Image: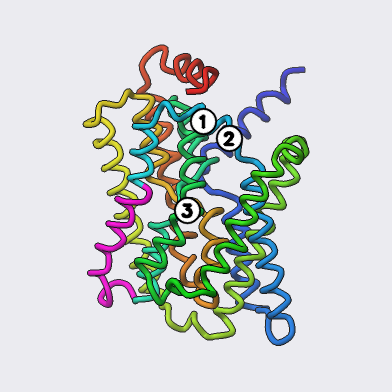
């Protein structure tokens, strides 16, 4: 009677040991589809219009799901949240700007623009929470830190793109500002205002809406890469440049993991809070960055999101190994402490 339990348990263990996100396969498949069958002619405006609607829907759902009460519960950990925000929107951008010295010898100007955009997007929520939990860190603080980063990023990321990327991201033109407001801020604000009435529905249908989220992002990727293929933008990227980009991103991730690890210790954070800072402060949100890129970069979005897609998979693989190492080194009682903190809301 117990035989089926063991294979199922072993299967779960095997899957958990593979730090490959299946969604990356779907993203790569979408890129391949756009390369083989890009939206051309009359199909292009349809794809772009659908992409615009998908971005608005995504940010409406982001706003409707964010619990204001949950965010306020984490305010008392202001030192931790400020540290994560500083890592996300100060340290990352500074390293991205420093990478300008690699142009044109290692990176092309377009790839550097994409790398810098990667450094400007907010931190992740789901994967940061998952890795913090595995490592026996402060899960409640990870929830709040990820939520704060996402909210701040909705406003700060477009402003930083306009300030640091200039012409690459459209600058402070009236068109770009209108796009940011209508496609990002207005849907998000509408979601927050309507959360009282739609929040319960979204919670009950969380799994289905997760597919809506991911499907919308795939649509954004298809539209962006279709424009890139039609404009011949992929002739600007060689395999050697791609390998160089992967190497640069590996160094970037290594630097951020090192800075967050030792920085949290020097600032006097507890072990649980330090783990939260490491996983929330060293990662970037693919789900948040992709729709923003479509709004901010337009036809150049395909190259702009390529570094983010590569970095996303890299951070999953590295952080999966790192989280398990933290868990093995956790002192006795750390797991119970993490659970009690999570139950207490911080």
Residue 180's tag is: none
Q: Are marks 1 and 2 in contact (CB under 8 Å)?
A: yes
Query: Residue 314 in magenta?
Result: no
Bounds of the magenta segment = 88-108
Q: 68 or 313: which is nearer to us? A: 68
Please name the residue shown 56% across and 49% down the image.
Answer: 21
* Residue 108, position as x, y percentages in the image: 34, 76
Q: Mark 3 — residue? A: 312
Depicted 318 relative to depicted 332: above or below:
below
Horizontal side, residue 233 vs residue 103: left or right: right
Q: Quadrant of residue 257?
A: top left
Q: Residues within 10 Å of mark 1 (few under 14, many from 20)?
A: few
Name which residue lies at 58% across and 72% down. 224
Cα separation, mark 1 vs mark 3, equals 29 Å
Q: Is residue 257 left or right of residue 101?
A: right
Asked which secondary structure carries label 3, the reply is helix
Quote the CA–CA distance across marks 1 and 2: 6 Å
Residue found at x 63% / y 59%? 217
Give the alpha-carbon distance from disc 3 to disc 2, as whole Å: 27 Å
Please provide percent x and percent y for residue 49. Answer: 70, 72
Where is residue 184? Give x, y as percent: 58, 58
């Amino acid at each position: 009677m117990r035989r089926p339990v063991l294979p199922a348990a072993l299967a779960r263990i095997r899957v958990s040991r593979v730090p490959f996100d299946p969604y990356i396969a779907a993203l790569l498949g979408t890129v391949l589809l756009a390369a083989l069958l890009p939206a051309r002619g009359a199909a292009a405006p349809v794809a772009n219009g659908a992409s615009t609607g998908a971005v608005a829907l995504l940010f409406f759902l982001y706003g409707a799901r964010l619990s204001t009460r949950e965010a306020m519960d984490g305010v008392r950990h202001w030192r931790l949240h400020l540290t994560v925000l500083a890592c996300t929107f100060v340290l990352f951008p500074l390293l991205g700007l420093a990478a300008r010295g690699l142009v044109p010898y290692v990176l092309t100007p377009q790839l550097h623009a994409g790398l810098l955009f990667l450094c400007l997007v907010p931190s992740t929520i789901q994967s940061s929470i998952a890795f913090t939990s595995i490592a026996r860190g402060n899960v409640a603080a990870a929830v709040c830190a990820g939520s704060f980063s996402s909210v701040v990023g909705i406003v700060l990321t477009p402003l930083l793109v306009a300030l640091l990327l200039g012409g690459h991201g459209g600058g402070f033109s009236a068109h770009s500002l209108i796009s940011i407001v209508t496609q990002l801020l207005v849907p998000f604000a509408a979601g927050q205002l309507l959360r009282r009435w739609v929040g319960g529905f979204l919670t009950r249908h969380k799994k289905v809406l997760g597919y809506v989220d991911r499907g919308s992002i795939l649509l954004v990727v298809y539209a962006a890469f279709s424009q890139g293929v039609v404009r011949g933008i992929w002739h600007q990227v060689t395999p050697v440049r791609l390998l160089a980009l992967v190497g640069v991103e590996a160094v970037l991730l290594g630097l951020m993991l090192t800075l967050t690890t030792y920085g949290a210790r020097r600032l006097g954070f507890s072990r649980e809070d330090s783990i939260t800072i490491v996983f929330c402060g060293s990662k970037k949100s693919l789900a948040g960055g992709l729709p923003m890129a479509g709004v901010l970069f337009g036809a150049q979005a395909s190259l702009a999101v390529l570094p983010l897609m590569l970095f996303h998979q890299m951070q999953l693989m590295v952080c999966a190994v790192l989280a398990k190492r933290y868990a093995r080194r956790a002192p006795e009682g750390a797991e119970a402490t993490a659970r009690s903190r999570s139950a207490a809301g911080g």
